[in-house]
Image: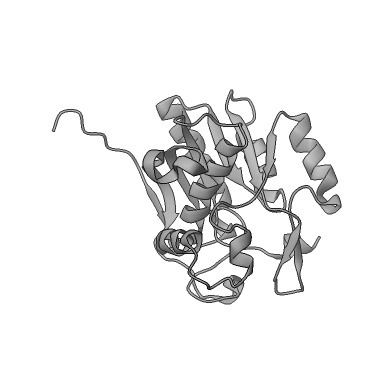
Amino acid sequence: MEGDIERKITYFRYCGEVNTEKVLHAAKLRCEEKGLNKVVIASETGRSAIKALNIFKGTKIKLIVVTHYPATTWGPKGDIPIGLKRKEYAKTLKKLEENGVKIVQGTRPFAPPTRSINWEFPTPEGIIDKTLEIFGAGTKIAIEAAVMATDAGEVDAGEEIVSCAGTYKGLDAALVVKTAYSGGFFKEFEVREIIAKPICRVKALPEYKYENWKGNLDQYYL
């Protein structure tokens, strides 16, 4: 039918960090195809952000990194610090900022303070979080990171951008979205295109032990 659009979608065999560079190259290509100039990268430690900086170097695409507040996550060799504004990642943060990357740290709209009462308690935000997770953690976080970047003023509400995120560590999903403020999420937010995502999702914790998650975690202990 006239007017229909066909674009390439990449479906990964595994979730996780192993897909990071493929996601970024696919995101860059889609930006070039559509003339988009903003990409959101979800990055807890800065590793995905630095890879994005290298891959998007020489383009006019603006990178916006959405990071976690200072905390830790589990790992095979002990807890991993997360939150790009921690002192452990000062050099990485400085490099990103010196290269014009915008950093957003804020509250996840689908994990607000009410969820700290009981993570499994069915708050409205918790229900949204678990519903989106059926598409995979990376897809969910890509949506959430885009909203956080909009709330922070780095993306305009209604703007079409690319948003990339992943499952546990690294990147495994990229979407074209028409973003919105968190207060207008249901009315205004749109997932317009899938660029890449895994064909599976992690269904048991910790993620790195699950059969469908792949990646190099040694780098997180350097």
Quadrant position of residue 119: bottom right
Q: Residue at x 74, y 30 (%)?
A: 99
Identify the residue shown where x is 50% and y is 63%: 126
Residue drawn at the location 58% of the way across and 38% of the way down? 151
Q: In x, y percent, where is residue 129? A: 48, 60
- Tell me, yes or no, if residue 22 can be seen here: no
Question: In the displayed structure, would residue 212 be above or below residue 49?
Answer: below
Choose between 188 and 142: the one closer to the eye. 188
> Residue 202: where, in percent of width, then height?
49, 69
Q: Quadrant of the C terminus?
A: bottom right
Q: How is the image coloured?
A: one colour
Q: Position of residue 187 (x, y in %)?
A: 37, 41
Q: Nearer the viewer, residue 94 or 68?
A: 68
For this view, does 220 lie left or right of residue 25?
Answer: right
Q: Is residue 157 visible?
A: yes
Can you say which quadrant of the picture contains the N terminus? top left
Going by the image, does 196 lie left or right of 5?
Answer: right
Q: How many marks?
A: 0
- Up/down of 85 relative to 156, above or below: below
Instruction: Please say if 135 is above or below 32.
Output: below
Residue at screen point 57% across, 39% down: 40
Location of residue 23 in the rendering, given as x and y in whole percent from the top left corner:
51, 47
Viewer-closest of 109 and 160: 109
Task: Please identify the residue farthest to the left as the structure is shown.
Answer: 1
Q: In this rendering, would 179 be left or right of 206?
A: left
